[in-house]
Amino acid sequence: MVNPGGPSGACELCRKRRIKKKDVPCWLPKSEFEVAWRDQNQVASEAVRRRVTARHRLASDKKREQQSTELIRRDSSEVPRVLPQDPEQYALTFFFDTYLRPSTLSNHQRGFFGCVSPALARAAPSSVLWPAINACAQALLEAWSFLNPNAPQSLAPPYYIQAIAAIRRHLQNAEDIDDDVLLATMLLDMYDRIRSFCSARPHKSPHIKGSAAMIENRRNIPITTKTSPSTLLAVRSRIVEDALKNGESIPTNVLTWTPVIQNTPRTAEIELGAINMEVANLQVSAVQLKTPRTAALVPGLLAKAIELDRRLIAWTATIPDEWVPTHIWDLESIPHSIREAGFYGNHCTVHRSIWTADTLNLHCTSRITVGLVILTCLEHVQDSVMDITWMETLTILQSLADTVCASIPFHLGDRTEVRRIDDKNIQYPQIGENLTPDEHYVAAAAFGGIFLMHRFVELLKLAPFLRPGQLPWILGQMGRIKKIYMS
């Protein structure tokens, strides 16, 4: 560095140590009196402030850690109180009284949830079903207690690991794949879905794929209980739903399960599941319409899509009479809070249960999937008659989207924020003077938002063809669901 020639302005010691004054202020006192009478108030006050801040931060961290490791206990008529020292029993009580709560409706289908209770009644204490149900119950309780099941303090992961280890031992010992094992994998899949939903991450469904593989290797076990065919059908339903959502084909081995369940009564849910297996494979085949072989594929795909659409239309004639929803057109009879929370169009629907509502919505989204294939095929056909068919198909698809949107008040009521799962202050649309059934308060809170999110994902495939303003409205309802369940 070039010396400009002027004095540095530093003291003698600083000059000897070659310390530039502009870089480091001189810390040496000017005289002995300055040492004796130096003002230390600012230095001392800064030191005190640092100690107080550190003390408060430590106390805050301890309080946050204590809160994150303790479950919030709620006074609830639906969830009987147990000793806080037993979180496992508390979680099981919560799970049985909400998600496995018996329905008062006759011939009521609840998917694999309807199989869990009978299986537990005869399950041995060492059954793989117990750690799986503990993991699922603990994760759900934490999610409803405003805790995060993904947090390090969660009590659910140890049960999850125990269930995985128990299933692995079961397979290593070459034991039969019984109902307990299949239901355990379904519960572990539900556990993964809870964690994915709470962290807004996509779900990959590894346990469902594992279930399909295990059923392929299932030995000739005589079906002596009602839960065996129902369990197989529940696994098949999950496989089909994931295939429709992810645009995947149905595994070949799933198509071979028919002999196992051929003696099962052909309910509306089973028939819809069988049709949806073909819908999923059609959706995969339609991807080839973007290849150079499009012209050769269009006639076959169009014919198959029209056939499936006719079968889906005919399916509506097979549903029980009590499944037919009631349409409420009188807006004055619908509470204002419901209309403010989320109301599309000029009417809403009321269903027998949250499960029948979701089955009918699944039917709508299946027809939408088939209709999109029909629209894609018609775009490659140069015919004025086909242009009219294209517009008619588009009108039908928009009507199906409206049907799903009309069921939102029945699923969510006027919920717009986090509330207790058994909160009976939530308002739902009612038919005349009929009051909302008690079980609907819990069922709608437990399943309503999850069911709707699955159907909304299917509606988004229709985004370019939705009515003006309907897409942002649907996205707003998806945001509402996230606020209700994840705030």
Image: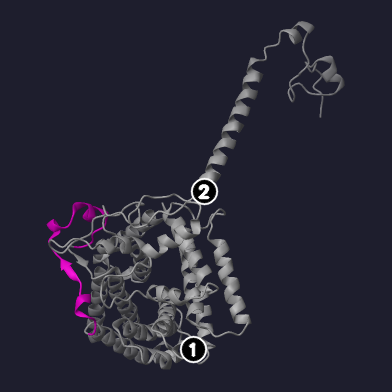
Mark 2, secondary structure of its residue: helix
Name the amino acid type tagged 2: Ser
Crowding near pointer 1: few (<14 within 10 Å), some, many (20+)?
Answer: few
Q: Is residue 343 magenta?
A: yes
Which residue bears the numbered disc 2? 68
- Give the vertical position of 367 relative to 444 (above or below): below
Q: Is residue 317 left or right of residue 235?
A: left
Front residue of this view, candidates 411 and 454: 411
Total numbered badges shown on the rendered structure: 2
Of discs 2 and 1, which sits in the foreground?
A: 2
- Give the vertical position of 288 relative to 160 (above or below): below
Which residue is located at x 28 percent, y 64 percent? 439
Mark 1, secondary structure of its residue: helix
What is the distance, in whole Å, between disc 2 and disc 1 at their CAs? 45 Å
Which residue bears the numbered disc 1? 253
The magenta stretch is 318-345
Whether residue 390 is visible to the viewer of this picture, yes or no, is: yes
Q: Position of residue 178 (x, y in %)?
A: 50, 83
